[in-house]
Image (cartoon, helix red, strand yellow):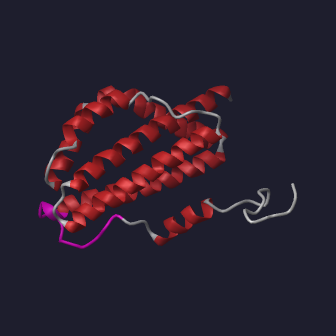
């Protein structure tokens, strides 16, 4: 069980580092994007990534861990320097694909830490597993928008005005996860302790 807990904590920390990096990168791309829809898309995703990083750090703390340096940080720092100043949606995504492919071997251990953490949570910590599954479902929205928009710009898909927003049921799940439980006192409860 101690090994599963360590795997969960490491996986959460790696995921946190990746999300913080994504938030920084996509915000940098948005800062210089002249197209309003593309800028909004980058910012929606950057904000979601930053929120995920914060939630992952909170979950780490709730499980007794501490957000700290993760195995991916050095590689991500190099990639950020290489990618943050790219201009143009297609060039940005091509650049991201290039560094992802190029650095796959270097990232293999970190990818394994993510997978091991997810599997350990699935086996031993249903609440953390549910939390991770929710975040991964939101990641799919971001990835789908980037793929679809790339296809639009390169002429492989018809143009749309879509943005990477969550589906209503995903928003409801987020809201439900923030509800208090019967064991928690109401915030406005002024009864003596």
Numbered-mark total: 0
Above or below 180: residue 93: above
Q: Which residue is the extreme one toward the right? A: 192
Residue at 35% x, 60% y: name it.
44
Q: In the rendered image, is residue 98 in sight?
A: no
Above or below 163: residue 82: above
Residue at 59% x, 51% y: name it.
130
Residue 119 screen position, x and y as percent:
55, 39
Q: In the image, 165: left or right of 184?
A: left
Residue 170 screen position, x and y as percent:
50, 65
Residue 81 found in image quarter: top left
Q: In the image, 182: left or right of 143?
A: right
Q: In the image, 49: left or right of 190?
A: left
Residue at 47% x, 36% y: name it.
114
Does residue 160 show up magenta in the picture?
yes
Q: In the image, 48: left or right of 66?
A: left
Residue 86 screen position, x and y as percent:
16, 46
Residue at 52% x, 31% y: name it.
10
Q: Main secondary structure of the magenta part?
A: loop
Residue 64 screen position, x and y as percent:
65, 34
Residue 34 found in image quarter: bottom left
Does residue 18 show up magenta in the picture?
no
Q: Which residues are magenta?
A: 152-164
Nearest the viewer among 118 and 53 is: 53
- Check the picture and name the quadrant holding the N terminus: top right
- Check the picture and name the quadrant holding the C terminus: bottom right
Q: In the rendered image, is residue 62 in sight?
A: yes
């Amino acid at each position: 069980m101690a090994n599963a807990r360590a795997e969960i904590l490491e996986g959460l920390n790696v995921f946190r580092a990746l999300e913080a990096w994504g938030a920084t990168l996509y915000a940098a791309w948005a800062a210089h994007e002249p197209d309003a829809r593309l800028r909004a898309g980058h910012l929606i995703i950057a904000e979601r990534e930053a929120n995920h990083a914060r939630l992952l750090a909170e979950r780490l703390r709730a499980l007794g861990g501490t957000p700290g340096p993760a195995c991916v940080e050095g590689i991500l720092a190099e990639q950020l320097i290489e990618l943050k100043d790219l201009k143009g949606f297609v060039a940005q995504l091509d650049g991201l694909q290039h560094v992802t492919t190029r650095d796959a071997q270097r990232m293999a251990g970190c990818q394994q830490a993510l997978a091991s953490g997810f599997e350990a949570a699935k086996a031993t910590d249903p609440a953390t597993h549910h939390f991770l599954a929710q975040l991964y479902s939101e990641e799919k929205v971001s990835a789908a928008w980037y793929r679809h928009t790339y296809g639009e710009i390169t002429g492989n898909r018809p143009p749309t005005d879509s943005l990477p927003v969550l589906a209503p049921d995903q928003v409801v799940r987020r809201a439900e996860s923030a509800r208090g439980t019967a064991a928690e006192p109401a915030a406005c409860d002024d009864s003596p302790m």
